[in-house]
Amino acid sequence: MRERWMTFKAIDAYLQGANFWVWETDADLRVAFLSQNFESLTGLDRTDYLGQTIWDLDKLGAKDSETDMRARMLEAHEPYDSYRWQFLRPNGDTIWLESAGTPIFDDHGEFGGYRGNTREVADEIQQALDMRESARQNRIQHKLLAQIGSISGIGAWTLAPDKSTVEWSDETYDIYEIPRGTEITLERGLSSYCDGARETISQTIADVLRNGGRFDVTLPFKTEKGRRRWVRSMGFIDGAGTPEERVYGTFQDVTEERERQMRVETIAMRDSLTNVNNRHSFNFELDDRLSAAKSNRERVILCFADLDRFKQINDVYGHAVGDEILCHVADYFAACVEPDGFVGRIGGDEFALIFTVADDDCEPVAFVNERVPRFVHTFETSVGPVEARLCMGVASAEGGEDDTVKIMRDADFAMHAAKSGGGGFARAFDTRLADTLHRRVKLVQEFQRGLRDHSVVPFYQPIVSLETGEISGLEALARWHHPARGLIAPHMYMEIFDDNRICLELGELMLNAICQDMKRWSNSGTEFGRVGYNATAVEVKRPGFALNVLATLSKHGLRPDQLVVEVTETTMFADIDMAAHNQLSELREAGVSIALDDFGTGYSSLTHLKDLPFNILKIDKTFVKDVMSSEADKSIIKSLIELGRDLGYITVAEGVEVQAERDFLRDAGCERGQGFFFDRPMSFRDASERLDRVIEVLAQTA
């Protein structure tokens, strides 16, 4: 602090009698120092302005419009020269002031404030007459600016009027690692820039000479001793169009700052788990490749890859093993795309591969099959070998307008088509995929309208005791009154159930409608037994599902034992997790029956049947329809019935269509049946009538 005070005192002594004052600011542009000349030239007390902003200082007697350009330069931390304004002294005299300043940066490139000077100048006529004094003041000014450059480590340079020679400050020589005082030509100054950077800086200076203005560029650079650095050069033109036209600039070594920035950018562009490129990097790469392809008449091939049933890997082996698989897949793809391709992880288990090809006849899928030859892998993990299957969708584009959106959409269509096909292969995009998607989108929109206007309603199919013929309950099945196609069943619009949102909306509507109908039957004294409500996997795993079911029953004054929640075997066990187990257990404990629908067609195991809270097994109709002609189906059904009985479950056979099937199932020990032999699904009104009469067909054939 004492050294700094002594420096300021020395400056005051040095400037005694000079026609300008010197000032310095901190990083917030607040005045930290004013030389004594400020008081003699302005008639003001300098202590009143210490700590004020440089704008407050320069606005003394100036119009607001005169400070706008200066403010912009200060905010941008740019050097400036010859900023003039008219100043009114306290005694009434008017003088002209001119200010120049240079930004201060530390070794790390951090802005530290400004150093500069402000001097009194006459108008243009007086300035021309007083050229000798102006020259003397300029010499002092340049000495001070040189001192500022020495302190800050920022070099300065001037391109002379002949446009071939350059004047450098000592700091610029040091950055170039050239002996101070060496005569420098523009050609030699530019030669230290690397190839592409040399063209950039040359063009930048040419543009300033031609069009005026300012520039600020950071480029790679090699000193004359061979050290590679990054340098920042800022400059502006003065005296444009006159014989004294010059370009002034600063020169700063920003290598450390640039390398730090590049490290941050590298981290931002990499996937933290797999260390391949991330989604952000993929977006840049795809845009760049498509732009280059358009210029070079090439094609870009994009491949979206997805791990089939990856959630099952996480559920069975744990997320740590799932992460191991993702890393193995990333390494495999990285090896496949070398040396000219690109791989990035763009989602949980989704990857993107990008290739550029010159051959217009190149078939995209054949190309991908050659570069990525294996779609089914067995990877070694911490728990042993684990198999993973890849589904890949392939699309290509030539780099035209809007190709980025189109190629991503096409590859996504193709990937989902590959997943639908069972995985383990690559599929190319074709227009039929788009047609299928458009049809599906239209169907989803129509179905959502149907949900809103309540044209989706429950129909009821009786479940009958095979021994007595009495109705023991009903299964509620969704039916859609389509405005053009009439009444249609879910198998005609199954693809919409891939949309989780649709599943949740339909489930909520059906549960409320079923409870309303059950309440109407209760109020009229109609016995209906228990009603089955079909819940999807996404509903069952949704937090609060069990509470919502129980709350809906309570709202309508119904008992939990009047409802059966049915979950299909394929949707349940293909994606089972602890959340679903907890939700079903909570319902079962409250008294709601849980039925395993379509039993025998999916993924069930004895472990699932033992651990999950089912109490009803519904044997799938695929076993029933051929039971009278297939000994194998007879054996399977008998085994399923016996299994259910041993576990204490109620067994229900679905798809009973003829009396012989009914008789066989009854004799085999199956307790209940459901199918067209008894009744088709029917509306609430028809179901109400059916519940009030005797099952005539059973009475005739018993």
Image (spheres, rainbow, N blue to C red):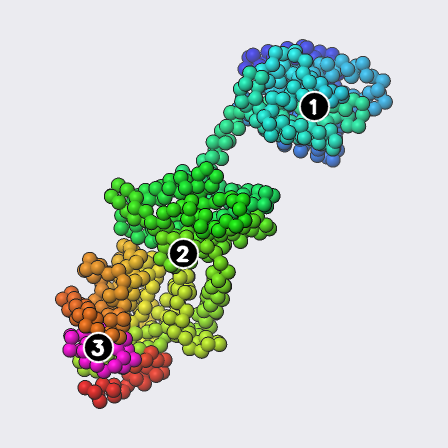
Q: How far apart are marks 3 and 2 (CA)?
A: 38 Å
Quarter occupied by the C terminus: bottom left
- Dot 3 and dot 2 residues touching (CB under 8 Å): no
Mark 3 residue type: Met
Query: Which amino acid type is marked by label 2?
Result: Ala
Viewer-nearest residue: 444 or 507: 444
Residue at 57%, 26% in the rendered image: 220
Name which quarter of the figure residue 111 lies in.
top right
Work out whether mark 3 precedes mark 1 in sequence or the reverse, and give the earlier one: 1
Which residues are drawn in magenta? 650-678
Left or right, 122 with respect to 255, comes to: right
> Could you tell me which secondary element the residue under label 2 belongs to?
helix
Looking at the picture, how far across and down is residue 267, in whole percent? Answer: 45, 35
Precedes in sequence: disc 3 or disc 2: 2
Q: Is residue 701 above or below residue 179?
A: below
Relative side of 636 to 499, left or right: left
For disc 1, the neighbor class at 10 Å (few under 14, some 14 to 19, many from 20) is many
Point 42% across, 65% down: residue: 496
